[in-house]
Image (cartoon, rainbow, N blue to C red):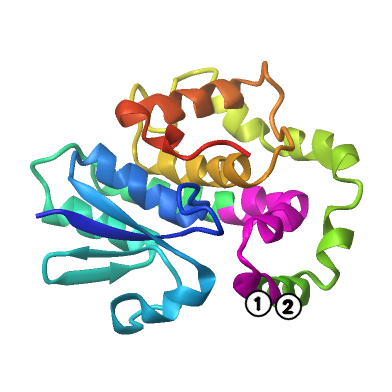
């Protein structure tokens, strides 16, 4: 049975952009599970599966409906144990929790101040008002003020990636010789930026950029189904 994945999209349904939805898309592909995506704008989330969640991703797998990206990954691992593992055991689950916290608090928090105006630009008119109001409240400034001087802030952002960059000098993936869900967590953040913004957050010769390209090519190029900004 085909799994449904509800994923966040703007005006162009072919360019889903949520980092959390991308984690799940990559996890489904890693598990070699057949799935179909349902592009969902911000304004449509309340109608997903009877309003069971205020956010996406949401999946429907037969009679099971799940929300929250990490919970979905845990469900897939337990529901399909015969398929390639997302974690490689309990230790991998625990390590992925750290990667999730670091990615959200260090990488995505900084990225928001680089790309938030680009996200607004790719939304439909019905979502733009909601997005501007909610994000400006969260940021404490206008979207335009949030991204001002972003080119000058790039070196500091790139320097903050040194833990990931240094680790990739030892191994090709966060998961070791091959990718695990921890890779998809970090990948989701960089895919978010790739899809919504033309700003090059990574230098071309950065080992993090090489890792990201490897991730884009995984599972038949699953990450490349959405065009870059």
59 left or right of 213? left
Residue 82 visible, this angle: yes
Q: Tell me the tag on residue 68.
A: none
Q: What span is in magenta?
A: 104-130
Residue at 26%, 46% (x, y): give it. Answer: 28
Residue 173 visible, this angle: no
Q: Position of residue 212 (x, y in %)?
A: 52, 29
Q: Quadrant of the C terminus?
A: top right
Between marks 2 and 1, how big is the CA–CA gap? 5 Å
Q: Which residue is mark 1?
A: 130
Residue at 30%, 30% (x, y): give it. Answer: 219
Question: Does the magenta-highlighted stretch encompass residue 105?
Answer: yes
Question: Does the magenta-highlighted stretch encompass residue 154?
Answer: no
Q: Residues within 10 Å of mark 2 (few under 14, many from 20)?
A: few
Look at the magenta stretch and give its main secondary structure: helix
Q: SS for tag 1?
A: helix
To which quarter of the image does residue 109 belong? bottom right
């Amino acid at each position: 049975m085909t799994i449904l994945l509800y994923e966040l999209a703007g005006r162009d349904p072919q360019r889903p952009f949520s980092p959390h939805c991308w984690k799940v898309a990559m996890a489904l592909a890693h598990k070699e599970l057949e799935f179909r995506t349902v592009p969902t704008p911000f304004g449509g989330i309340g109608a997903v599966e009877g309003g069971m969640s205020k956010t996406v991703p949401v999946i429907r797998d037969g009679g099971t409906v799940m929300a929250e990206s990490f919970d979905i990954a845990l469900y897939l691992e337990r529901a399909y144990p015969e398929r390639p593992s997302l974690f490689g055991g309990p230790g991998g689950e625990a390590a992925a929790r750290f990667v999730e916290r670091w990615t959200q608090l260090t990488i995505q928090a900084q990225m928001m101040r680089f790309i938030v105006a680009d996200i607004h630009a790719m939304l439909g008119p019905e979502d733009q008002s909601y997005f501007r109001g909610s994000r400006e409240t969260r940021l404490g400034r206008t979207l335009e003020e949030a991204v001002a001087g972003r080119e000058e802030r790039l070196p500091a952002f790139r320097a903050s990636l040194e833990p990931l960059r240094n680790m990739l000098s030892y191994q090709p993936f966060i998961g070791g010789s091959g990718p695990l869900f921890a890779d998809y967590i970090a990948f989701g953040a960089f895919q978010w930026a790739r899809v919504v913004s033309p700003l090059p957050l990574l230098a071309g010769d950065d080992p993090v950029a090489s890792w990201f390209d490897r991730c884009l090519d995984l599972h038949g190029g699953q990450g490349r189904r959405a065009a870059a900004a």
